[in-house]
Image (cartoon, rainbow, N blue to C red):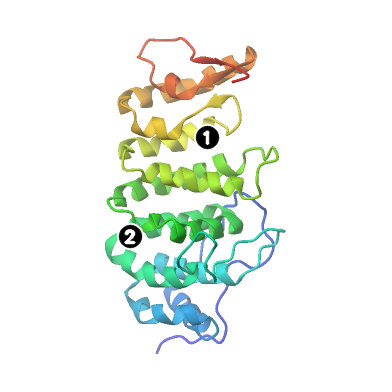
Amino acid sequence: MALKLINPKLRFDGWEPSGVFRRPKDVRTASELRASVEAWSRTVPEVKQILPELKNLKKSHLGLVADTIELSQKKATSWKDVDLRNVSKDGIFAPLDYLMYLYPRLAKTNTSALDFTKEVIDNAGQITSKFYLRDAVDLQFLTMKNTEKNFKAGVPVVESMAKYALNAPANGRAEFAKQEEFVELVLSILDENANVKKIPFLKDILKRVSNGGLGVFDIDKFLSDKTPVKLIKANIPNLDNALNHCYSFGKRLDVNEQLAKKLGDDSIAELPYNI
């Protein structure tokens, strides 16, 4: 007999810090997740369309469905928020309604896009997760062709991407500037010119290069240029020393050039501090 719930089992109770936030593991069972989505459908009309598909979704993707619905119903604890129920000024579709339509289709055609999206929700906090979901619909990047390998390679990099974008100094930027930068990173790894074999290296590079700090890093250039993967792998461990050198002399580091240096070249790819 299928489990029935009067109220959905929630995952986002209480306050959470802004910015990067590693969410505790989702401990709801598959039965609880299906029952939660069914409970949501009684008060959220957009959810009804996905009910026949729930039996075909694996547990992690059921969790993504439940998380998406809950985020759409939850008001942010900060002064800014993202609306997932209504069409944005730049959009065509209402995000929640469209995602309930799209998720079962991606489960058949691009499961890595779902895994990546789940990883965003698990690492990026509520505001950034909602911003990402809205832009996923407005920009249609979950349905971009030939991106399954990109999404798959990007899953282990999501946390580093989130920290790079969301921990950067605000410096008077627009209210969603950090969230916009995170989505731009996502679009970078999905670009048709991106070398999928280079995406995993972003995890270690972004850990070392703080956004707005001493390292100047062009991610699009890194992913699309001809620098051999073997050379990048050899040069990543030297980034710390290069960054420390630049700090000591009031310089900034051209990270792309540093990663492209030939083996045995001990020079530092310095830039003037004020560029």
Q: Residue furthest bottom?
A: 1
Q: Amino acid at mark 2?
A: Thr
What distance separates the C-alpha of mark 1 from that of mark 2? Answer: 27 Å
User: For this rendering, which residue is in front, 264 or 41?
Assistant: 41
User: Counting residues from the N terminus, which is met first, the one under dot 1 or under dot 2?
Assistant: 2
- Which quadrant of the structure image shows residue 272? top right
Q: Secondary structure at mark 2?
A: helix
Q: x%, y% of residue 12?
A: 60, 66
Q: x%, y% of residue 148?
A: 30, 52
Q: Residue sitting at 58 percent across and 18 percent down?
A: 244
Residue corresponding to mark 1: 207
- Which quadrant of the structure image shows residue 197? top left
From this viewpoint, is residue 58 visible?
no
Q: Secondary structure at mark 1?
A: helix
From this viewpoint, is residue 55 visible?
yes
Q: Residue sitting at 48 percent across and 67 percent down?
A: 95
Q: Residue sitting at 55 percent across and 84 percent down?
A: 43
Q: x%, y% of residue 202?
A: 43, 36
Residue corresponding to mark 2: 111
| Label annotation for residue 173 | none
User: For this rendering, which residue is in front, 27 or 123?
Assistant: 123
Q: x%, y% of residue 57?
A: 35, 71
Q: Amino acid at mark 1?
A: Lys
Q: Are marks 1 and 2 in contact (CB under 8 Å)?
A: no
